[in-house]
Amino acid sequence: MANFNGKFDTVKQDWITPDTLFQKLQDEFRFTLDLAANEQNTKCSKFYSEEENALSKHWSGICWLNPPYGKKDRKLSDWIYKAWTESQKPDCTVVMLIPARTNTNWWHNYCMKSAEVRFIKGRPKFGDATHGLPQPLAIIIFKQHSGETKFSSFYIG
């Protein structure tokens, strides 16, 4: 079995979502709440900080979520499960930017039940990073829906 210890770890967890990526989604969804942000990187006037811990809050409205990908106490799978759970309520839509880890249980148990999955074409550069993220990314749209999950490409140009 392969050893992936530390493979996806990063010290920095508050990377700023690229404006070119976010603005396309903002134009479409008109977000009301940023679920994992701070004063420097929030994309909405209303946000939950790390100290406020969005995982312990009720979510409503049109929510943006670029969760920390490598926190030990708040795993990515915790964010995925919470987003799916909250989106089952009629007053909540969650649009997430996450790594496209299609081999994980959480991907198959929750992302594959989302309303939509948009695979990002290219490697967006976050904040002041020198290079784009070296892993595939996806936009997951969790909301109440009936029918099949829609899959598409999302080009940020």
Image (tube, rainbow, N blue to C red):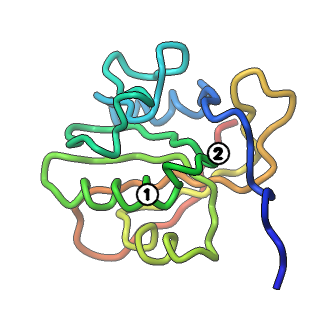
Q: Which residue is mark 2?
A: 155
Query: Is 2 on the left or on the right of 80, as rendered?
Result: right
- Image spot of residue 55 (x, y percent): 34, 46
> Which amino acid does the dot numbered 1 rest on?
Asp
* Element marked by disc 1: helix
Badge 2 vs badge 1, beta-carbon distance below 8 Å:
no
Q: Real-space Cα distance between discs 2 and 1? A: 27 Å
Residue drawn at x 41%, y 26% is: 49
* Element marked by disc 2: strand
> Which amino acid does the dot numbered 2 rest on?
Tyr
- Image spot of residue 119 (x, y percent): 60, 57
Q: Which mark is residue 48?
A: none
Q: Which residue is mark 1?
A: 78
- Nearer to the camera, 152 or 19: 19
- In the image, which is nearer the foreground, mark 2 or mark 1? 1
Q: Is residue 41 above or below residue 78?
A: above
Query: Is 97 on the left or on the right of 51, as rendered?
Result: right
- Nearer to the camera, 80 or 25: 80
Residue drawn at x 78%, y 63% is: 5
Query: Is 122 on the left or on the right of 105, as rendered?
Result: right
> Which quadrant holds residue 128?
top right
In the image as oriented, which residue stretches furthest toward the front? 73
State the quadrant of the N terminus: bottom right
| Mark 2 / mark 1, whichever is N-terminal | 1
In the image as oriented, which residue stretches furthest toward the left? 90
